[in-house]
Amino acid sequence: DESNYAAIASDNTKLLQYVSSVLAYAKQRGYDGVDVDWEFVRSNTQQAFVNLINVLKNTMETWNPVGLLSIAVPGWYNPANDVGTMNARADQVNLMTYDLTGYWNPTTGFDAPLHAPQISGYIGQDVETCVSAWIANGLNPAKTGLGLPFYGLSWEGADGPAQGYSHESQVSYDWIMGKYSNASYNWRSDAQVPYLGISWDPVDGKKYFISYEDSSSLTTKVGFAKQMNLGGVMIFELWRGIINGTQPLLTAVQNAVRGNTQPPVTLNAPALLYPRNDT
């Protein structure tokens, strides 16, 4: 847990042993660097975090070629993730701009809305506000990666945002497409995200509000990353985006990064893949 991690990073002898072990494994596997995913750094563990980053980077600078260091940080700004250290030592800082709502909230929300939804009583954060806060607090945009989720959130007992629900869970795209229908598909223009609103599911009779990404929202998010002059994008859980052995979400992101927004393949769920005219 975090307390044990902080204890190791606060003890120079243990930290050197830990870094030596991690980097030996990375080199054995032929990796070009490491990613630090410390969730979440707090004010009383900040120095331990800084120690870890410095020792990792100092050691990787002896590699030939020099090893790369990436760091995952919360989507929302966290001052304990020392921005000065990350700017100086990290090659890329990946913002986890997803899970911006979840089971900890009393009402349903979008997993990664680009902009704040204009919905009365809505609880949850948005990508634009999160990224802007990090940049305003000094994070180097050129080293910043925008996090993109390749999974969805399923809220049982609701069929829209800002509603009460009975259960929330992360779901894969195979599962989402099993619930998809033209009638259930919705596009939220203010938030720039799709969702499925199912008042009665013919399989189990339940209500579902399903927040997910399609090529329209992914294309828009990549455009936002370019507009903000960010260094790139980071994808979380590639495997959940595989559909019938294909990776349409990954292809949509690749196309958007390269400036080509044409749909790469055809699926039975066109809203998943085809960019909308209004994005």
Image (cartoon, grey):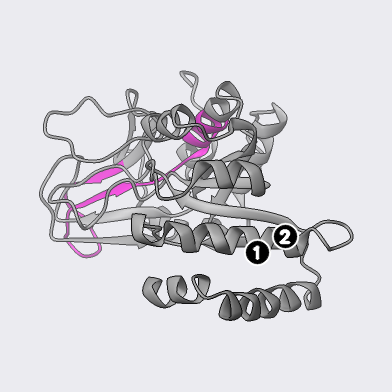
- x and y, in percent, of residue 29 in the image: 77, 75
Identified at 52% across, 75% down, the residue is: 11
State the residue position of label 1. 55
State the residue position of label 2. 58
Report the magenta residues as a range: 196-222
Residue 243 in view of the camera: no
**Quarter of the rendering containing residue 109:** top left
Does 58 sit left or right of 87 as displayed? right
- x and y, in percent, of residue 233 in the image: 60, 41
Identified at 73% across, 72% down, the residue is: 26
Query: In this rendering, is residue 77 above or below 164?
Result: above
Query: In this rendering, is residue 36 above or below 189?
Result: below
Q: Residues within 10 Å of mark 1 (few under 14, many from 20)?
A: some
* Residue 24 or residue 107, whichever sits in front: 24
Does 101 sit left or right of 265 as displayed? left
Helix, strand or loop under label 2: helix
- x and y, in percent, of residue 50 in the image: 53, 57
**Quarter of the rendering containing residue 58:** bottom right
Helix, strand or loop under label 1: helix
Q: CA distance from mark 1 to mark 2?
A: 5 Å
Q: Are marks 1 and 2 in contact (CB under 8 Å)?
A: yes
Q: Residue furthest top?
A: 278
Does 40 sit left or right of 59 as displayed? left
* Residue 193 or residue 78, whichever sits in front: 78
Task: Please state which amino acid type lies under the numbered disc 2.
Answer: Asn
